[in-house]
Amino acid sequence: MLHLQASRAKLLSVAEDISDQRWRESPAPERWSAAEVVAHVAMVEERTIYGMKRLLQSAPRPVPLRKHFHLPLAIATWRGRKVRTPIPLDAKRVCDKRESLAGLNATREATLAFIESTRGSDVSLFHFEHPFLGNLNMYEWFRTIGYHELRHAKQIRELVETFHL
């Protein structure tokens, strides 16, 4: 929970550095605006929680020992290599700054409610594949949500730096 709070605080802090006027502005071709980044972050978090809810509808399946090994989760913050998201960006989610951040907040509230609903259950028994990191259990997925946010906080910081040149 602390990791999710800290990553969200970091994302919101850098988002504050983008003016309302530049919120939807892309700094270059093939680069996302802050509005697109925030829409993506919310969509990924929602998709992750949706996948977890579906997974909990049936008994956990055994996972071979070799599948318990994966890349370190913190690698998700590394911006040295651009990665294409497997989740297409929904243009309807790209909004003005106030609406974008309100949507992001609503997504996090739903995530926290879901986490609370799993309290007392051992969700480490439930696994599903991350497209880049490997097979993760639910606790690792919760942490990955935070690392994903930190990656995109760095991306927004790059936008701020571009706009201030």
Image: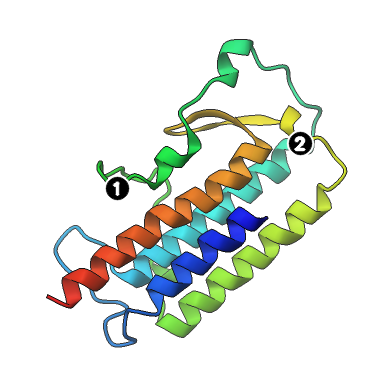
Q: Residue at x 32, y 79 (%)?
A: 18
Q: Residues within 10 Å of mark 2 (few under 14, many from 20)?
A: some
Horizontal and vertical percent for residue 115?
74, 52
The total of numbered circles placed on residues is 2
Label 1 to label 2: alpha-carbon separation: 30 Å
Residue found farthest to the bottom: 21
Relative to 98, say whether 137 is above or below.
above
Q: Disc 1 residue type?
A: Arg
Name the amino acid type tagged 2: Val
- Residue at (31% x, 44% y) in the render: 84
Residue receiving disc 1: 79
Q: From the image, tell me which residue sits under label 2.
A: 123
Q: Which residue shows up at 26% across the image and 82% down it? A: 22
Instruction: Name the foreground residue: 159 vs 60.
Output: 159
At horizontal 49% and vertical 37% (from top left) the residue drawn is: 73
Q: Furthest-top residue in view?
A: 65
Local SS, label 2:
helix
Would residue 26 be visible to someone looking at this image?
no
- Left or right of 47? Residue 160 is left
